[in-house]
Amino acid sequence: MSLLKVENLSLGSDRISIVKEVSFVIHRGEIYGLLGESGSGKTLTSLSIIRLLPPGVHILSGKIIFKEIDLTGLDEENLRNIRGKEIALILQDPLSALNPVLTVGEQIEEVLSGNKAERKRRAIELLKEVGLPDPEMRLRNYPHELSGGMRQRVMIAISLARDPSLLIADEPTTALDLTLQIQIMKLLLSLNQKKGLSILFITHDLGVMRWIARRVGVLYKGFLIEEAPVEDLFKTPLHPYAKELMKAYSIEDSGTEMRALNLKTQEHQGCPYLALCSEKTEKCYKKGVPPLIAISPKRKVRCWHYEK
Amino acid sequence: MKNKLLVQAKGLWKSYEIRVSLFKKIRFWALKNINLEIKERESVVLLGESGCGKTTLGKLILGIEKPDKGHIEVSTSVQAVFQDPYASLNPRMKIKESLLEPFLIKFRKSEKEGLKKVINLLREVGLSKEVLELYPHALSGGQRQRVALARALITDPGLLVLDEPTSSLDVSVEAQILKVLKRLREKTGASYFLITHSLRVAKALADKILVMYMGNIVEEFSAELLNKTMHHPYTQMLIRAYPDPFAPSPPPFDQIKGEVAGITEIKKGCPFYPRCPIKEDICLTGSPELKPLSRKHSIACFLVSKLNHLN
């Protein structure tokens, strides 16, 4: 059953669109991944769900349906009941997301209800759940007294405080060391398995994506260019851009060295990847963006080559 | 093949004073007894996580910092490329000016000759001469890093210190820069001292890999031995923690534990003791020294005899 349904979502300013007609579905209990490089629109897409878009950027068209409610039609007040309570968010840099002048305990208890003792008990419970050692002692710490890994655990604890059904995790491991990254991945996976927490996981890191998400959508220049179950995507990527990304990761056989030469980005009305594509043929110069073509019930790709 | 030594460091110690409260300062050792050799045409990779002291070692080689104890001899010209190309290029200088300036200072030749070399180098790093008249803000991160690389190479240095040169770049751009680095090394014969936290980057460029943990070099080995020999427990942990997207099975989530001790909680014994999966009482008796296992491999561990091959 679907928990979140994003339909033909376009985001941008009055003059340009940055995210273009993106659609995807997150099922209950699923980890869905959005994969893309910087500027591909993955963060904007995720922020638009709880409407935390930067100034000047707004939803141009499309629907965001969460538990049968279209979030794009909600006013601020109703949206506030969704943020944190139903949909929680964790970000890349926990130090700037935490308040430096409040203790860990104050920041967790802030979002809880009940009397003081109850709130404290629940805060300790949450810190235990996210695997922070000595939770009682940590409640009195300020963010700067914690390591990067611990801060991210505190962020996750706060996000879980209201028992949300969807967690948006935007590059939560990118600022962390390798040995901490894997521990945060493990924590999110276990929250998903034990509590059935649905997660929208955003990253540019192929390795992290491979081992955390169940289904993945690949974004390129604001377009969803491929969607597939994670094993299929990594075994047999279909879109030329996805193929190039996989090759680049294993450095050795990447053939892209001289590719970033074009200083002038040509605004072509057709396929967004045309300028860089190594598999382009005559039909790729067709007018219009290729549609997201369903190859099988589970796989979709936005490329003229797969048109029947 | 006998190659000349470009950098020779013996027993380097470096500390910083850190204020832990209003009245209390503590001395934090960023580097402890480091020995290092970089040969001509050699690419040495320093692998470690944040705060382990790897950038400090780079600064000692560049002469930006002086060691507290020990001796370092650098017998070649050194240039540097840093992580953030947004910060390392002057936003008010055209790319042409940024590239020409070091050339004119070092060689005292005409601007025309300089420009010839600039254009040549730009081609080497994969940029066209269109960029000459542009300012840094008009370039992408990858293009800026190429410019930074060209600028470092324009004075024909014998050694390049590369401090996380690709960590702020996208995967596809990173692959391009690494390829350029590889090709330039063959062409110019410059040695590299590459500082990174990424096993993938280390694999792509290293002749020799040094693994650093809390200011100590815990292992030193020839790059071809990676994964083919026994490794220090920390190196093993790094290898296991790397999520390889093309591996047949997920990384062993349960085997990676703990984190680096805070600077105020440093205790006696092996620095890796609190996280080590094979620790014993002997490990608390002191800090183990780097001991050679073979000509190409040294490990600093009391329990060398108990280390197993990874696979």
Image (cartoon, coloured by chain):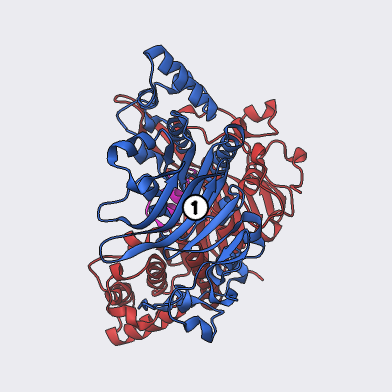
Give the magenta part as a residue range.
B51-67
Chain B, chosen colour in render: red
Q: Position of residue B53 (x, y in %)?
A: 47, 45
- Tag 1: residue type? Thr
| Quadrant assignment for the N terminus of chain A | top right
Residue B2, by quadrant, is: bottom right
* Chain represented in blue: A
Of residue A32 and residue B183, the one placed in the foreground of this image is A32
Q: Position of residue A252 (x, y in %)?
A: 62, 68
Secondary structure type for disc 1: strand
In this rendering, the count of numbered labels is 1
Q: Which residue is mark 1?
A: A203
Q: Is residue A108 left or right of residue B212?
A: left
In the image, taking residue B228 as reference, residue A58 lies left or right, namely left
Vertical side of B244 occupied by A264: above or below: below
Residue A215 versus residue A142 in the image, above or below:
below
Residue A228: give x, y in percent of width and height: 60, 58
Where residue A112 sits, quadrant-wise, is: top left
Task: Name the residue: 67% across, 44% down.
Answer: B232
